[in-house]
């Protein structure tokens, strides 16, 4: 499509956008009494209006039924989490038995590593990406220590080549082969949080398995953003948070995936609790753990229903729309934003550079922009003028034109504000 950097053109794209109406399902903060242009849905998604209704329902059931709500609430609490299985499995390309919701992301990755990181003297290494999200780095270090190894021996980071912003698939694959029989686990962010690079999870999983390793994915920036086929890709396990693209509210519950092929493996160690115990006999208070077949067998505690309520509202909204439709708009609006950035860059003589891959198969809903000769001043200018972006040291802003609630008109206005911010120094 031939894009134009004009208001009329942006508005025309909005009239052709079948998801345009969904922005009215969300609550936007206001700056200068106007709704903001929100680019940080990759960090904390906006509040969907329906979230409150789902929470109120739980509050009312709690008020009216108290403990009886476990069984007699409109959506009974004792198996509330099972309502996620169908819609969430469609969202991540899994079988319903392969997904569940519980805890929070880093906690779930730790719990899954209990099962899938079982180092031996010969096979003890973990492959991850260089500059992984800090929580993941701390997790790797502490897991390795816990098993009596040293991070410098056991953690292998895949590096970017000098002068390059993204990691090459070929470098990941050759590193996997090089580590070979020493490789216990590959665990990478499916979409890199800093650059927005999307990794080829299918190929990496396959090549990791050839070396006899388990392969898991941190899908914090992937779920609700890209098409996932976790079952078919033969991924061993994965986990994600729900408050980024999934709009479920600050710090909210995590989803996780355990491949069907592991469901009957009684040898896999795990940390157990009563919510993972055989569903029919859970309240018989039996002394010996008998896990639920499926990802639900990794559950530990009874669930925070007030947190799950807005997550359920969100998952149902995504299911109603479907990832295909979201992805179609995601690609068009991200390309339009890229076009606008490039146009503005010419007008201000190239003071910034997009570090996200230009190739559409390697990116999703995020453009990370390196600001040459600019700094926090520009970020603050944007914020004052109603654009919420996110600032990462040393001088990168991340822009996520979330297809559910950003418009093409937002992209045009953003371009104008950005240009003024750079020229009006
Ligand atoms: C956001 C994010 C996290 C956050 O973890 P929490 O346990 O939810 O605080 C972890 N890993 C990645 C890759 C992330 O992007």
Image (cartoon, grey):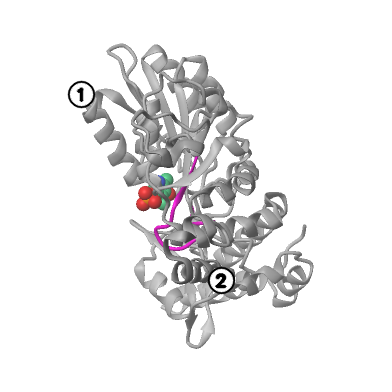
Q: Is residue 187 above or below residue 88?
A: above
Give the side of residue 100 with respect to residue 19, left or right.
Answer: left
Farthest-out residue, bottom: 33
Residue at disc 2, secondary structure: helix
**Res 283 visible:** yes
Image depth: mark 1 or mark 2 in front = 2
Please tell me whether the stretch drawn in magenta is mainly helix, strand or loop: loop
Which residue lies at the image location 48% right of the left edge and 60% below the top edge?
A: 69
Q: Is residue 391 left or right of residue 217?
A: left
> Viewer-proximal residue, 122 or 381?
122
Query: Is residue 78 within the magenta segment?
Result: no
Label located before the other in sequence (1 or 2)? 2
Closer to the camera in the image, 254 or 410: 254
Q: Position of residue 416 (x, y in %)?
A: 57, 76
The residue pinned by badge 2 equals 53
Under circle 1, the secondary element is loop
Question: Would you say 214 lies left or right of 135 here?
Answer: right
Q: Is residue 371 left or right of residue 320?
A: left
* Region rendered in magenta: 242-256
- Residue drawn at (70%, 57%) of the image: 320
Q: CA distance from mark 1 to mark 2?
A: 48 Å
Q: Is mark 1 within 8 Å of ligand 1?
A: no
Q: Residue 138's spot in the image, x, y percent?
A: 28, 41
The x and y percentages for residue 287 are 33, 31
Q: What residue occupies the far front of the structure in this picture?
A: 284
Q: Is residue 158 visible?
A: no
- Across and down, in percent, residue 172 comes to 47, 27
Q: Which residue was labeled with disc 1?
A: 148
Figure quadrant of the N terminus = bottom right
Residue drawn where x is 38% and y is 39% of the image: 274
């Amino acid at each position: 499509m031939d894009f134009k950097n004009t208001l009329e053109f942006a508005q025309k794209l909005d009239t052709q956008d079948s998801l345009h109406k969904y922005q009215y399902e969300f609550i936007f903060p206001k700056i200068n009494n106007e709704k903001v242009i929100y680019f940080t849905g990759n960090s904390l998604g906006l509040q969907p209006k329906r979230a409150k209704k789902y929470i109120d329902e739980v509050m009312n059931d709690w008020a009216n039924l108290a403990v009886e709500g476990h069984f007699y609430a409109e959506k009974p609490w004792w198996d509330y989490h099972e309502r996620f299985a169908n819609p969430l499995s469609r969202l991540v390309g899994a079988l319903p038995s392969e997904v569940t919701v519980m805890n929070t992301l880093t906690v779930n990755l730790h719990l899954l590593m209990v099962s899938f990181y079982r180092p031996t003297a010969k096979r003890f290494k973990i492959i991850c990406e260089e500059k992984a999200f800090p929580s993941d780095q701390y997790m790797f270090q502490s897991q390795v220590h816990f098993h009596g190894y040293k991070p410098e021996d056991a953690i292998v980071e895949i590096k970017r080549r000098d002068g390059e912003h993204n990691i090459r698939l070929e470098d990941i694959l050759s590193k996997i082969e090089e580590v070979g029989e020493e490789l216990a686990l590959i665990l990478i962010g499916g979409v890199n949080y800093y650059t927005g690079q999307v990794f080829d999870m299918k190929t990496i999983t396959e090549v990791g398995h050839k070396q006899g390793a388990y392969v898991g994915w941190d899908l914090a920036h992937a779920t609700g953003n890209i098409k996932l086929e976790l079952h078919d890709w033969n991924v061993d396990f994965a986990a994600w948070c729900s408050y980024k693209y999934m709009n479920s509210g600050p710090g909210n519950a995590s989803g996780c995936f355990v491949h069907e092929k592991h469901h009957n493996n009684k040898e896999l160690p795990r940390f157990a609790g009563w919510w993972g115990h055989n569903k029919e006999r859970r309240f018989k208070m039996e002394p010996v753990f008998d896990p639920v077949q499926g990802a639900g067998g990794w559950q530990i505690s009874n669930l925070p229903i007030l947190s799950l309520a807005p997550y359920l509202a969100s998952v149902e909204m995504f299911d109603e729309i479907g990832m295909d439709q979201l992805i179609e708009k995601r690609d068009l609006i991200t390309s339009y934003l890229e076009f606008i950035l490039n146009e503005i860059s010419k007008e201000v003589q190239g003071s910034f550079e997009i570090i996200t891959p230009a190739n559409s198969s390697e990116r999703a809903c995020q453009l990370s922009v390196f600001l040459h000769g600019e700094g926090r001043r520009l970020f603050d200018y944007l914020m004052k003028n109603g654009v919420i972006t996110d600032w990462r040291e040393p001088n990168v802003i991340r822009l996520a034109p979330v297809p559910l609630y950003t418009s093409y008109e937002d992209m045009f206005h953003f371009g104008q504000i950005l240009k003024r911010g750079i020229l009006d120094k």
